[in-house]
Image: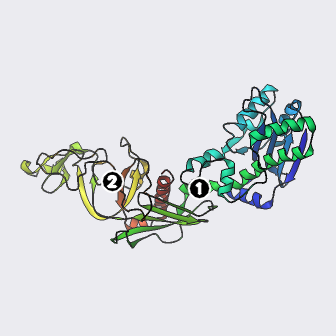
């Protein structure tokens, strides 16, 4: 069995600490095997990065013959024993189950099984389209970040090289095998910075003042927009710009700015218990039955879900609510009262008993975006949602907690599209 241990560059150690914190209990690992099935294939190489005696090291164990697989597994488990967190790239699907199965074959304890798992692939891959990645292979992510490799081989291509090394013990082939595994580990460390993208949903309102600012849309019409500075929990490795449904975001390093179109006009607040309300067609709003008894019967009708509202004119900011209306979302509670263009549970349809439709009634579900895309750009299609609004008043603009919650809501929407 060949064993190699070497120090990892301080720059990678520092970056790892930035994105995952204290390294003392963390192990980064990757394996190389002679095939995909743990029933017929062997594990011939395992590499890991961890803190040891004050140094951040890369340790590799290579079986010079298939008979040494058990020794490799035992040595690796003993060396990482006591560590608490295991970080890997797509290891939940392949590396860890393979490692566990081969340990079971020899009746060995698998130290990795008891550790908390972090799969970088599963954290980053949901943002494939947002980041415009062709795929989420480790090499692709490294290229996205501008780093390259010396190793030209894939794991599959290395299998034949390993078998040749077993027969010939050519040191040049040994170096090729170890290089590939080492670059997988170092590549994993380099893409830790991409954890900053899913962490955008934890952004906080920045030090700058949130404000409603005059702007001009692409048709030349005067409007207003919310300028919301944000600060990220982790620095972005590359500048990022996103837009969907009228929301624009740009960020670089640890700070960014979200621009949100302000709806200026009249919206409706819908009372949830419509059976306790009467609708006044002439005034176009609903009032509680306890008050409606004083209104002539000729001027009131029982309220329906789509007519049980009061109207309000003002400046409003959009909310992108889940499609379900069976229960109020957390946003509807946090930013209450929430206003709508139409009844949130169903589109308005048919005529009112008086023959008059409530003002602004709609006959379809989603509304068009509040702000058009730039000339030459294609509007990004987002997941289905209910469009709600809340008042952009001073109570909101001067509340850092609400501003941060709204930023998190907007990022959740942008990163989903």
Residue 317 visible within the image: yes
Q: Residue at x 48, y 72 (%)?
A: 209
Q: Nearer the viewer, residue 288 or 48?
A: 48
Q: How is the image coloured?
A: rainbow
Corner quadrant of residue 167: top right
Secondary structure beneath disc 2? loop
Q: Are the residues flagged by discs 1 and 2 in contact, CB closer than 8 Å?
A: no
Residue tagged 2: 367
Judge whether residue 63 can be spotted in this image.
no
Residue 9 percent location from the top left of the image:
81, 59
Residue 168 versus residue 226 in the image, above or below: above
Q: Quadrant of residue 251 in the image? A: bottom right
Label 2 packing within 10 angstroms: few (<14), some (14-19), many (20+): few
The location of residue 152, given as percent across then percent down, is: 76, 49
Which dot marks residue 197?
Answer: 1
- Say which residue appears at 66% left-offset and 52% top-offset: 141
Residue 122's place in the image compared with 99, above or below, is: below
From the viewer's perspective, is 176 left or right of 325? right
- Check disc 1 and report its element: helix, strand or loop: loop
**Residue positioned 62% across, 62% down in the render:** 238
As drawn, the label of residue 113 is: none
State which tag comes first along the sequence, 1 or 2: 1
- Total of numbered circles in the picture? 2
User: Residue 277: where, in percent of width, then height?
Assistant: 20, 47
Q: Label 1, label 2: how many angstroms apart (C-alpha)?
A: 28 Å
Q: State the residue in front, 69 or 358.
A: 69
């Amino acid at each position: 069995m060949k064993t190699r241990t070497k120090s990892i560059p301080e720059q990678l150690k520092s970056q790892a600490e930035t994105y995952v914190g204290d390294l003392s209990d963390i192990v980064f690992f990757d394996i190389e095997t002679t095939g995909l099935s743990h029933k017929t294939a062997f594990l011939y190489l395992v590499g890991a990065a961890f803190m040891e005696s004050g140094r951040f090291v890369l340790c590799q164990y290579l079986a010079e013959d298939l008979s040494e697989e058990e020794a490799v597994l035992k040595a690796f488990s003993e060396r990482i024993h006591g560590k608490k967190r295991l970080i890997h790239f797509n290891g939940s699907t392949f590396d860890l189950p393979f490692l566990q199965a081969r340990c079971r074959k020899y009746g060995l304890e698998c130290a990795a099984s008891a550790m908390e798992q972090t799969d970088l692939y599963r954290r980053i891959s949901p943002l494939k389209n947002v980041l415009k990645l062709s795929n989420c292979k480790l090499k692709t992510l490294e290229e996205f970040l501008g780093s390259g490799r010396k190793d030209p081989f894939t794991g599959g291509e290395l299998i034949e090289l390993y078998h040749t090394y077993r027969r010939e013990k050519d040191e040049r082939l040994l170096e090729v095998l170890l290089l590939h595994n080492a670059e997988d580990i170092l590549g994993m460390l380099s893409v830790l910075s991409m954890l900053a993208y899913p962490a955008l949903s934890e952004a906080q309102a920045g030090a700058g003042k949130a404000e409603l600012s005059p702007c001009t849309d692409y048709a030349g019409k005067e409007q207003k927009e919310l300028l919301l500075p944000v600060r990220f929990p982790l620095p972005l490795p590359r500048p990022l710009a996103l837009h969907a449904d009228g929301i624009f975001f740009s960020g670089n390093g640890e700070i960014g700015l979200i621009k949100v179109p302000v709806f200026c006009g009249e919206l409706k607040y819908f009372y949830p218990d419509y059976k306790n309300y009467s609708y006044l067609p002439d005034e176009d709003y609903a009032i509680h039955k306890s008050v409606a008894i004083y209104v002539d019967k000729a001027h009131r009708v029982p309220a329906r879900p789509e007519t049980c509202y009061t109207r309000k004119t003002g400046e409003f900011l959009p909310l992108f609510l889940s499609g379900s209306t069976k229960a109020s979302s957390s946003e509807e509670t946090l930013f209450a009262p929430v206003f709508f263009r139409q009844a949130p549970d169903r589109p308005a349809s048919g005529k009112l008993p008086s023959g008059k439709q409530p003002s602004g009634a709609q006959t379809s579900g989603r509304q068009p975006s509040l702000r058009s895309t730039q000339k030459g750009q294609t509007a990004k299609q987002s997941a289905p949602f209910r469009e709600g609004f809340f008042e952009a008043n001073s109570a909101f603009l001067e509340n850092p907690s609400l501003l941060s919650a709204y930023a998190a809501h907007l990022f959740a929407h942008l990163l989903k599209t």
